[in-house]
Amino acid sequence: MIMDWLYVGLGLILLLLAGDSLVKGAVNLALRLGIPALIVSLTIVAFGTSAPELLISVQAIIDGVPRIALGNVVGSNTANILLVLGIPALLATMHTSECDTRVSYVQMLAASVLFVALCYLGPITWVDGLILLGALLAMLIHAALSAKRHREGVVVDESALEGVDPDMGWPRIALFLALGLVGLPLGANLLVDGSINIARDFGVSETVIGLTLIAIGTSLPELATTVMAALRRQADVALGNVIGSNMFNLLGIIGVAALVGPIPVEARFLSSDLWIMLAASLLLIPFVFMRVDIGRMVGVIFTMLYLGYMVVVLG
């Protein structure tokens, strides 16, 4: 069992480092090739930061444990709201009253409703995967067009993009890409294999492992980003990070994973976990539409709600 925990720990470390490496390499490569910074932030960066969840979901289906894939996404989305917003709020108030995320938030809710509906229709198959990916493409196109209209005539500071290094040469770009492309599948394989063995040793299902251990582990990049955004008083980055990540998890990750193999939906998802995920999403309404700041009391409530959810899942 000690080796299994070591595999999980090593897998998480590899996923975090490889994901960061892939983002740095891909961002700098795209900008060297003349791809606009806006498109880079909407596509390559979004994919790079969600690559750990994607690789784990695909690996889980390949290994014959698709319930981990579904548990990972549902658990990550719940953690992204209650934990990833709750903990930073304990450190500093996030002034969400200063940012407008209404359109993207409504899109996230629409993605959540679509995802829940497909789960109720039965196993998530390649047809459902195409539907989810089509919805993701439509949202990305809408975001790109909206951003282009708002930024027309404005010079975009590419150095503001995370991972950009004006002095990075082609050899370093190639090295970052190679480390990311090699490290991600290796880390995913270690994490999934170790988690499966731990689940069997403790007599819990792969679903529970996906909802807890893997979900929290793959939400660490979002948590780190949101903590820094809160400390820097960048509420738009913090809230936008969570909303964007949740949309990509539901539409992109499950969409791609469903093309690899069918994903069964257990009764527990239909009776509780999906609705808890949706309820957590609805908790953001006051902060999005009523411009209420996410203060320390909200952080306490969100964190306690997540701990309560963990007790219910593990119980």
Image: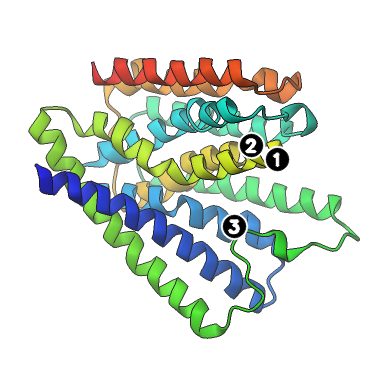
Q: Which residue is mark 1?
A: 234
- Residue, x 64% and y 50% (percent of image)? 140
Tell me the crowding category of disc 1: few under 14, some 14 to 19, or many 20 or more residues within 10 angstroms, Cα based.
Answer: some
Task: Give the residue type at disc 3.
Answer: Thr
Where is the N terminus found, in terms of image quarters?
A: top left
Residue 49 seen in render: yes
Q: Is residue 114 above or below residue 148?
A: above
Task: Give the residue type at disc 2.
Answer: Ala
Marked residue nearer the N-terminal end (1 or 3): 3
Instruction: Using the image, tell me which numbered label, if any, was put on residue 43.
Output: 3
Nearer to us in this view, 181 or 275: 181
Marked residue nearer the N-terminal end (3 or 2): 3
Task: Give the residue type at disc 1.
Answer: Gln
Secondary element under disc 3, as helix, strand or loop, is helix
User: Is mark 2 in CB contact (under 8 Å) with mark 1?
Assistant: yes
- Residue, x 71% and y 65% (percent of image)? 159
- Residue, x 51% and y 19% (percent of image)? 302
Nearer to us in this view, 117 or 60: 60
Q: Is residue 232 above or below residue 266?
A: below
Instruction: Using the image, tell me which numbered label, if any, was put on residue 230.
Output: 2
Identity of the residue furthest to the right in this view: 153
CA gap between label 1 and label 3 equals: 21 Å
x, y percentage for residue 284? 62, 22
Secondary element under disc 1, as helix, strand or loop, is loop
Q: Nearer the viewer, mark 3 or mark 2?
A: 2
User: Is mark 3 in CB contact (under 8 Å) with mark 2?
Assistant: no
Tell me the crowding category of disc 3: few under 14, some 14 to 19, or many 20 or more residues within 10 angstroms, Cα based.
Answer: few
